[in-house]
Amino acid sequence: MASGVLWLQARISANPVAVLERMYDGEDQGIAKASQLVREEPDPESQRLMLKILHQDHQHLQQMQLLIDQYRRTSGVH
């Protein structure tokens, strides 16, 4: 476990923007899959709840993108 943490810390230190972008991409892929499942959900109440959660997930992605952009501007890392 400790070696995994050290590896992750080294990766983040080496290129934090790349790590953030991979996190963003993973979140985006998860949302895309969940969106597909929502369209297949026959129960309207379940679908409404799932859409509400997906809306929050999309907002989270927007916030992540803003943080990535801000980090790029302030750190000079691309």
Image (cartoon, rainbow, N blue to C red):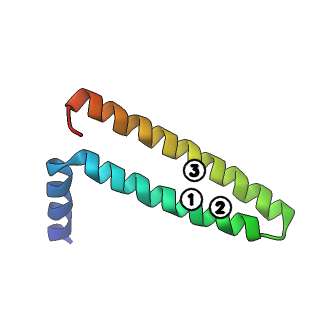
Query: Is the Cβ of the residue at disc 1 closer than 8 Å to that at disc 3?
Result: yes
Measured Cα–Cα span from mark 1 to mark 2 = 6 Å
Judged from the image, the secondary structure of the residue bearing numbered disc 3 is helix
Of 42 and 46, the residue lying toward us: 42
Which labelled disc corresponds to residue 57?
3
The residue under label 1 is 31
Measured Cα–Cα span from mark 1 to mark 3 = 7 Å
Name the amino acid, label 1.
Ile
Judged from the image, the secondary structure of the residue bearing numbered disc 1 is helix
At 14% from the left and 56% from the top, the residue drawn is 10
Classify 10 Å Cα crowding around label 3: few (below 14), some (14-19), many (20 and above): some
The x, y position of residue 6, in whole percent, is 14, 62
- Going from the N terminus, do you reach mark 1 or mark 3 first? 1
Classify 10 Å Cα crowding around label 1: few (below 14), some (14-19), many (20 and above): some
Name the amino acid, label 3.
Asp
Name the quarter where the N terminus is drawn: bottom left
Choose top left, top right, bottom left or bottom right for residue 73. top left
Up the image or down, 73 lies above or below 21; here it is above
